[in-house]
Amino acid sequence: MVAPPDNDVLWARALHVRHNGSPALTGVSLGVHEGEILAVTGPRGSGKTTLLQCLSGQLLAQDGEVWFDQAPVHTLRPSARERLRRNRFGWIDPAPALVPELNSWENAALPLMLRGVGRRRAKATALEWLDRLDVGGCARTRPYGLLQSERQRVAIARALAPAPTVIFADEPTAALHRADRAQVLRTLTAAARSHGITVVLATHDADTAAFADRTVSLLDGRRVNTVHLPAVAETEGRAACSLSA
Ligand SMILES: Nc1ncnc2c1ncn2[C@@H]1O[C@H](COP(=O)(O)OP(=O)(O)OP(=O)(O)O)[C@@H](O)[C@H]1O
């Protein structure tokens, strides 16, 4: 095994994943720098979610390596991978998956309490994050009483509250109206930057990817280079295309 470069908090080498025999990732390698916001882009079905699942230790690739903080993840036992996910990673789904029996602050405080933080401190931290995400007024409301956009903000507060080393955000604003998207992304990326949190953001939306420091593109499970061509009149063709790397 070859160790990853020093400034890469996450590093993947030659990942191959097949779902029920069909290839989802084919030889994907990438490094994510510490504190960076990296967008993983590509059309639907290009392998973005599968890549995030591999990087976060949720899914073991059939072939290839994943390293976090200079240590291999792919050789860890399931219980150690689970600890790693709980203690160092946060995850934001496209649709908010909140615990229906808990109110907003309890949902946001949950990962902190799972890490052993006392209830009072966990509540104070959760309330701070709910305020930053503009849902402080819903702190005592359960998910069924919230709008979908408010639920997603609570889910984002929950991911940020424990200040994880890395947040994996899979289409985090897919459930939001266009008007809400930019504001939520600005809050998420500003919070990540101010706390030194690395973000890996999967999206098929160019406006969302624009919030990232760098973009990695996938097409049919392979990494491709996005080549930006000079803008041309609409009738003359597209302004950007992808080439296989
Ligand atoms: N659990 C699964 N079982 C079978 N096939 C799967 C499974 N998960 C993903 N796939 C297939 O693997 C390929 C990659 O899927 P993946 O969800 O990673 O892509 P994606 O770029 O995130 O797509 P989307 O934007 O629609 O979420 C697709 O062809 C998908 O149909």
Image (tube, rainbow, N blue to C red):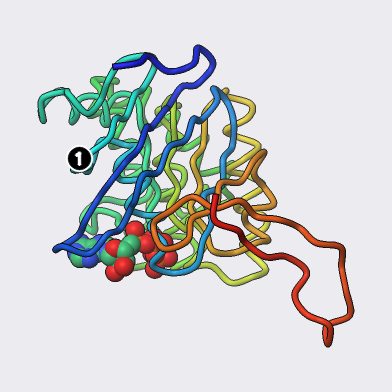
Q: Residue at x 38, y 51 (%)?
A: 140
Q: Is mark 1 within 8 Å of ligand 1?
A: no
The spot of residue 109 in percent (x, y) is: 34, 36
Q: Secondary structure at mark 1?
A: loop
The residue drawn where x is 45% and y is 48% is 169
Instruction: Please name the amino acid that badge 1 sits on.
Output: Leu
Outermost residue to the bottom: 235
The N terminus sits in image quarter: top left
Q: Which residue is mark 1?
A: 60
Q: Quadrant of ligand 1?
A: bottom left
Q: Is residue 143 visible?
A: no
Residue 149 in sight: yes
> Residue 239: horizontal and vertical position, in percent?
78, 69
Residue 121 falls in image quadrant: top left
Residue at 57 percent across and 23 percent down: it is: 196
Specify few, some or many for label 1: CA neighbours under 10 Å numbering under 14, 14-19, or 20 or more: many
* 95 and 227: which is toward the camera: 227
The picture places residue 176, in percent across and down from the top left corner, at 53, 67
Q: Position of residue 241 (x, y in %)?
A: 67, 65
Residues 143 and 175: in front is: 175
Residue 242 or residue 103, whichever sits in front:
242
Left or right of 93? Residue 182 is right
Residue placed at 32% from the left, 29% from the top?
A: 66
Q: Is residue 112 above or below residue 17?
A: above
- Compared with 77, 102 (above or below) is below
Q: Quadrant of residue 231?
A: bottom right
